[in-house]
Image (cartoon, helix red, strand yellow):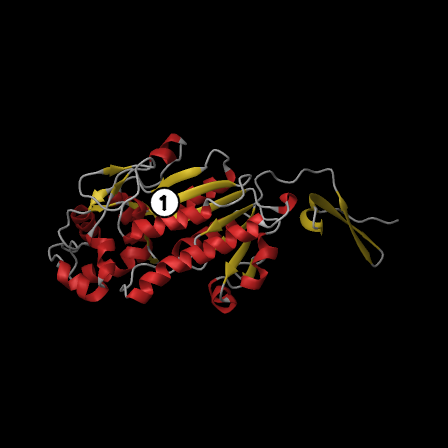
């Protein structure tokens, strides 16, 4: 039999409901026939297959970009294929699998890990209906992911689940310092986070679970800064409310790196705060932003104005909490941006580029 040159590939395939094969292969081609056979070359230990909910969101988009750039296999779990295809066009993201809900099980099956970022954004006016959807959207997606993972045979079940939650878990305070051991608060967002985390904790005990309590994410394409920068550019930027509330933030690159590390490092399990080591009061954050933009930060936005626009949702920015990433630092995670001034300079320079 005439054999042409071999190329090392990775193959993941379910042979039956109880047998999962994940082997490096070599392609041997004969006259008019391609045969795939096992090679003695080992599969790259750091090669991942990751299924992601919330992949079209602010954090999810950057995570997909990072994983794809590092040649990992990415499965985008979405409710809207058309939206996902616009965000991840084939020409820019060859090889990415986009799966609507009926295909989620097939996508999760055989994945190395799952990242759960799904849920309705909270930065909107809270009507009773929206408040209900903020909670139910998170519980529904998380519950579906957990059920799909738990129903899989051991051989094809993901080994790690990285599930998002939020620093809202701790409630709010101008004086307390919160770490991963701190108790939950007693307001609406704390309740949402408790139920969100409680749902994720139902995952099969053989699956390593990392719960990332995420702070305010700073980046150039979305999040809080996307709404604040236009105000500063017309000389109307300033502290929201008293400015004394704590602002526990993290740069987009750092939260993506933290999730990435949690996928691949077996030491990352349990609750991990996704915040930078140096939270600031909101007035200081606004002062740094004004300086970076070359604009003053002198016109505070009064409480009543925010409440008129956001209703109860104003509490997200009028109240805050001082959260420290104790566990991440114990694990040796290296923050690219530890100080908000440096994070803002990086983001604004990207926008100007």
Q: Residue furthest right?
A: 1
Q: Nearer the viewer, residue 111 or 144?
A: 144
Q: Quadrant of residue 137?
A: bottom left
Q: Residue at x 42, y 43 (%)?
A: 211
Q: Nearer the viewer, residue 326 or 2?
A: 326
In the rendered image of this protein, does residue 172 appear above or below residue 45? Answer: below
Q: Quadrant of residue 176?
A: top left
In the rendered image of this protein, does residue 96 appear above or below residue 113? Answer: below
Q: Can you give x and y, in whole percent of width and height, for residue 136 in the image?
A: 40, 59
Residue at disc 1, secondary structure: strand
Q: Residue at x 42, y 46 (%)?
A: 198
Q: Can you give x and y, in whole percent of width and height, for residue 63 in the image?
A: 45, 51
Q: Nearer the viewer, residue 26 or 155?
A: 155
Q: How many marks?
A: 1
Q: Can you give x and y, in whole percent of width and height, for residue 189 in the image?
A: 30, 52
Q: Is residue 79 left or right of residue 166?
A: right
Is there any visible trace of residue 17 in the rendered image? yes
Q: Residue at x 65, y 40 (%)?
A: 43
Neighbours of disc 1 within 10 Å: few (<14), some (14-19), many (20+): many
Q: Is residue 312 left or right of residue 149?
A: left
Q: Residue at x 26, y 47 (%)?
A: 186
Screen quadrant of the C terminus: bottom left
- The residue wearing badge 1 is 213
In the rendered image of this protein, does residue 54 appear above or below residue 10? Answer: below
Q: Can you give x and y, in whole percent of width and height, for residue 144 in the image?
A: 51, 56
Q: Residue furthest bottom?
A: 82
Is there any visible trace of residue 100 in the rendered image? no
Q: Nearer the viewer, residue 257 or 199?
A: 199
């Amino acid at each position: 039999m005439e054999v042409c040159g071999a190329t090392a590939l990775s193959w993941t395939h379910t042979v039956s409901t109880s047998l999962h094969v994940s082997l490096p292969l070599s392609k041997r081609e004969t006259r008019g026939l391609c045969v795939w056979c096992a090679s003695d070359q080992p599969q790259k230990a750091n090669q991942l297959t990751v299924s992601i909910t919330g992949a079209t969101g602010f954090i999810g988009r950057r995570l997909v970009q990072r994983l794809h750039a590092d040649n990992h296999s990415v499965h985008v779990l979405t409710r809207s294929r058309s939206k996902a295809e616009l965000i991840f066009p084939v020409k820019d993201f060859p090889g990415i699998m986009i799966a609507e809900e009926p295909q989620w099980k097939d996508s999760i099956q055989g994945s190395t890990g799952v990242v759960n970022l799904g849920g309705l954004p909270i930065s909107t006016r809270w009507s009773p209906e929206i408040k209900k959807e903020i909670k139910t959207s998170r519980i529904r997606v998380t519950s579906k992911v957990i059920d799909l993972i738990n129903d899989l045979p051991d051989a094809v079940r993901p080994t790690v689940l990285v599930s998002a939650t939020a620093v809202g878990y701790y409630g709010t305070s101008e004086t307390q310092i919160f770490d991963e051991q701190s108790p939950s608060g007693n307001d609406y967002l704390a309740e949402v986070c408790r139920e969100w985390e409680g749902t994720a904790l139902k995952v099969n005990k053989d699956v390593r679970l990392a719960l990332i309590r995420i702070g305010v994410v700073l980046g150039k394409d979305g999040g809080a800064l996307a709404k604040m920068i236009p105000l500063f550019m017309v000389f109307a930027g300033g502290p929201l409310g008293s400015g004394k509330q704590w602002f526990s933030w993290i740069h987009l690159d750092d939260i993506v790196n933290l999730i990435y590390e949690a996928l691949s490092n077996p030491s990352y399990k349990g609750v991990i705060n996704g915040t930078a080591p140096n939270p600031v009061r909101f007035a200081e954050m606004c002062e740094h932003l004004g300086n970076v933009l070359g604009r003053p930060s002198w016109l505070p936005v009064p409480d009543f104005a925010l409440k008129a626009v956001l209703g109860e949702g104003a509490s997200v920015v009028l109240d805050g909490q001082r959260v420290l990433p104790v566990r991440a630092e114990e694990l040796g995670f290296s923050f690219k941006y530890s100080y908000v001034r440096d994070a803002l300079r990086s983001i604004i320079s990207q926008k100007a580029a």
